[in-house]
Amino acid sequence: MLERLGASADRLVRRVMPDPFVLVLALTALTWAASVWMLARHGMPAVSPAQTASPMAVAAAAGASAEMLFKGFSELLTFAMQMVLIVVTGEAIASSPPVAKAIRRVAMIPRTQGAALLLVTTAALALGWLHWGFGLMTAAMLAREVATVCRERGVRVHYPLMGTAAYMSMLLWHAGLSASAPLLINTPGHFLVRQIGVVPLAQTVFLPINLLVCALLFLMVPWVLRAMAPSDPSSITEIDEALAKERVADEAIENSPKDSNEADNIAAKLDRFRGWQLAVALIGAVYLWRHVRARGVLDLNHNVLNFAFVMAGMALYRTPVAYAKAISKSVRGTAGVVLQFPFYGAIMAMMRDSGLGHAIAEVFIAFATGKTLPFFTFLASLVTKLFVPSGGGEWAVEGPVMLEAARRLGAPYGLTTMGVAYGNMAGNMFQPFWALPLLGLLGLRAKDIMGYSLVVFLVAAPVLGVALLLA
């Protein structure tokens, strides 16, 4: 049954899903129009109440919404650069000779299509729970290498489904150790501290119901992916031959040794001298040791992770130039992030500043009680996710509204926060934004994997929703 469902969802998505850039343009235009409507209907500071929804009000609202779009366009540029670094440094580490060899050994384990899907999905879920950035890139590299090894062995593996398996690293991330919202409200001095205080991780990530639901999905989802594998050989699309030849290990080894045609002059010797990178990596290791000692191993924000990835990457390559070449090759997977992040920043700003995000949340709050608010927060988060794919961005739009509702209704702050987190991570299964870095590495398109991930959404969303109701 799941095989037929997966095939049907795949055909549907391929027919109707536009390119991710077209999707973000459409979402930008729709959000702008909705924010104009919100501002015109509820009044602008420069427009009298009697003129609400008049042509003057609409014109003023249109201008104000355009200002919000411009303001938001640059709000996520720092975050976008952080994401680019996570992508390129993560791939460079995975392509380094030692790590590539380890990935290669793991990729040799599965002997059938089903075993390959179980391996990649399980690894992706576990790594994504530990840290979404590292998990996303490592799972992508593992999926590509497993598909390559299977092709060499004559084992036919449906490559789009392998890509979906790697993307499962984003299914449990907001319930794991790098979860944006739970980590934020566990931080002293966070922007909602006067409203809710500091909420410990024991009430969010380490809440027993959260650990239970993560364990349940960890056991279920790999078998869902395996069950969707095509049994008809004619329906299997293997990894592209040209892509398969770019072996992970071969890419790393090609970058490492000395070029036999290279001049043996001072400049060349300096380029090959490993002491530069090891010295800087050692200095970085000293800082990371001090950071972990002072703040704990769980304080893995984006800046710390990127710093650690750069230092580790330099230590793993034989020469500075080899590492620079690996980074240069890795940049190819970041075009979607660079192009689309500013538009999602604009959407986030329009939803937040026009009150549109607040209005969406209030629709669901109206039906909630103290017991059911986390569940309705989950539903609201699924809607908001389409427009604001970033976990931190969605929390900025939706978190304050939902936590104020939690205060009024007497709902637990931690569980309400997990409602936002669950909607955000489950929404990854129909919002392709976070698949962009992975797709660049795997040589796939969003429509190649989103049909299958929709099926995973249909499985995971009820589990998450019921857990919030039972907690």
Image (cartoon, rainbow, N blue to C red):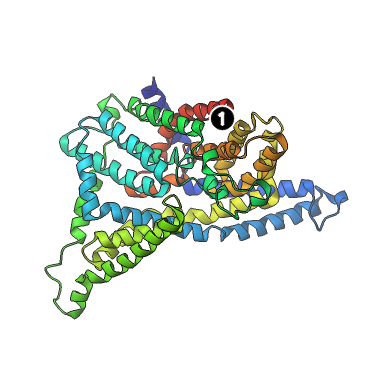
Residue at the image point whose x is 34% and y is 67% from the top? 283
Q: Give the residue type that dot 1 points to.
A: Leu
| Residue wearing tag 1 | 468
Give residue 8's position: percent from left, percent from top: 42, 26
- Most extreme residue toward the top is 1
In this picture, is 452 found above or below 396?
above
The quadrant of the picture occupied by the C terminus is top right
The quadrant of the picture occupied by the N terminus is top left
Residue at the image point whose x is 83% and y is 55% from the top? 47
In this picture, is 324 found above or below 13?
below
In this picture, is 264 found above or below 146?
below
Residue 186 shows up from this direction = yes
- Most extreme residue toward the bottom is 266
Q: How many marks?
A: 1
Give residue 281's position: percent from left, percent from top: 31, 65
**Relative side of 55 to 459, left or right:** right
**Relative side of 171 to 469, left or right:** left
Give residue 377's position: percent from left, percent from top: 61, 36
Q: Residues within 10 Å of mark 1 (few under 14, many from 20)?
A: many
Q: Secondary structure at mark 1?
A: helix
**Relative side of 467 to 252, left or right:** right
Give residue 16's position: percent from left, percent from top: 48, 36
Query: To which quarter of the image does residue 73 belong?
Result: bottom right
For this rendering, which residue is in front, 373 or 55? Answer: 373
